[in-house]
Image: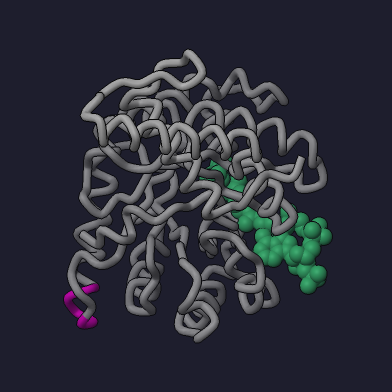
């Protein structure tokens, strides 16, 4: 498996409707960590073939060679799924997003097709990554098995619009109806050593609502979030950026830890607070986030 693909940081993954030629042709101008072309629910049935062709060409365009590309394909048991896979793997997509993943078998079935297509078109077998979106109660029940189902999986994601439909409820500003699913996905992803991604916030004009949800999922531990609108990108990146106070503290922790290591000490105190393994690990994450996102603008 492509280790670099697995370790890459993804705060933002921007959905781009595959049938929208204007958006598909210029979404590389936005600074999302990944562009996620959609062939599934944002594409009308009569536009499925046209969207696949548009995305097939976009993936090979020079402007999409320097940004990570993900494609959400249709389910394999639909009439479009296999054709979608054939097109996007041949075109060299970085990651295939499998929607509505209910079981580990769904991932294994898709992986077999991806491996066959890679071999047929001369791509290195194993080079295409996978991302499984869980969007049902059954999928949440199977989250641990799904997260462990393939070495190609870079992460698992929540698909909340379909999930709340399945639960027979709707999304609320507080997200109480999603708490169990979010925690299940995080637990499963972390136990399997892969990334956890939150779902879309569907009201592109509600900035405060987006920020509230993004702060909530960051606090839970998510690595990032699927987005539907370019205006959400900077809001999210800024939220993942540490404050200058957090950064200064992290730097002091690392300095204290390095000094302690020179003296052969495992635990040391900084202004009366214990500094040991997990705290140092956390400080490293803050430094990594600052390197990527800068300092948070309040
Ligand atoms: C439940 C699910 O399955 S969610 C996943 C599937 N859904 C999607 O992919 C939807 C993606 N998002 C969109 O289509 C749009 O953002 C909408 C419909 C939500 C809102 O559209 P608008 O009101 O036109 O957005 P807005 O006014 O902010 O657009 C500003 C600019 O950003 C572009 N833009 C908006 N959304 C996107 C996007 N997702 N990707 C790329 N470009 C985009 C617009 O084309 C416009 O460009 P222009 O200035 O060159 O004309
Ligand atoms: O995966 C997502 O975030 C979008 C989606 O399909 C859903 O919410 O049902
Ligand atoms: Mg969905």
Q: Which residue is the extreme one toward the bottom?
A: 62
| Residue located 66% across and 41% down the image | 201
Asked if the magenta segment contains residue 81, the reply would be no
- Is the stretch drawn in magenta largely helix, strand or loop? helix
Q: Position of residue 41 (x, y in %)?
A: 57, 53
Depicted 64 relative to depicted 150: above or below = below
Q: Which residue is the extreme one toward the right?
A: 205
Position of 129 compared to 71: left or right?
left
Depicted 182 relative to depicted 235: above or below = above
Asked if the magenta segment contains residue 120, the reply would be yes
What number of labels is visible? Answer: 0
Q: Quadrant of residue 241?
A: top right
In the rendered image, which quarter contains the C terminus?
Answer: top right
Picture quadrant of ligand 2: top right
Q: Quadrant of residue 29?
A: bottom right
Between 184 and 283, the residue placed more toward the observer is: 283
Q: Position of residue 164 (x, y in %)?
A: 57, 28
| Residue located 44% across and 57% down the image | 74
| Residue located 52% across and 44% down the image | 224
Residue 77 showing in the rendered view? no
Q: Position of residue 10 (x, y in %)?
A: 48, 52
Between 279 and 107, the residue placed more toward the observer is: 279
* Boundaries of the magenta span: 118-122
Position of 129 compared to 253: left or right?
left
In the rendered image, which quarter contains the N terminus?
Answer: bottom left
């Amino acid at each position: 498996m492509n280790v670099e693909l697995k370790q890459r940081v993804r705060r933002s993954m921007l959905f781009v409707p595959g049938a929208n030629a204007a958006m598909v042709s210029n979404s590389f101008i936005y600074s999302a960590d990944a562009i996620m072309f959609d062939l599934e629910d944002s594409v009308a049935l009569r536009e499925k073939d046209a969207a696949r062709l548009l995305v097939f060409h976009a993936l090979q365009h020079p402007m999409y060679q320097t940004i990570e590309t993900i494609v959400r394909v249709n389910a394999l048991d639909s009439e479009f799924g296999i054709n979608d896979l054939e097109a996007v793997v041949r075109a060299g997509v970085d990651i295939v997003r499998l929607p509505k993943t209910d079981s580990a078998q769904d991932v294994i079935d898709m992986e077999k097709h991806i491996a066959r297509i890679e071999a047929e078109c001369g791509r290195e077998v194993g080079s295409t990554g996978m991302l499984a979106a869980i969007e049902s109660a059954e999928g949440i029940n199977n989250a641990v098995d799904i997260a462990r189902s393939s070495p190609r999986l870079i992460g698992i994601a929540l698909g909340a619009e379909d999930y709340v439909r399945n639960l027979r409820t709707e999304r609320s500003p507080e997200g109480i109806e999603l708490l169990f699913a979010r925690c299940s996905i995080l637990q499963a992803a972390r136990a399997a050593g892969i990334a956890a991604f939150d779902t879309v916030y569907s009201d592109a004009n509600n900035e405060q609502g987006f920020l509230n949800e993004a702060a909530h999922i960051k606090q839970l531990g998510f690595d990032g979030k699927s987005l539907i609108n370019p205006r959400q990108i900077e809001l999210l990146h800024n939220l993942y950026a540490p404050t200058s106070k957090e950064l200064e503290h992290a730097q002091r922790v690392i300095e204290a830890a390095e000094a302690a290591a020179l003296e052969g000490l495992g635990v040391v105190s900084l202004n009366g607070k214990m500094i040991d393994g997990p705290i140092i690990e956390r400080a490293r994450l803050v430094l990594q986030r600052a390197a990527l996102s800068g300092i948070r603008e309040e």
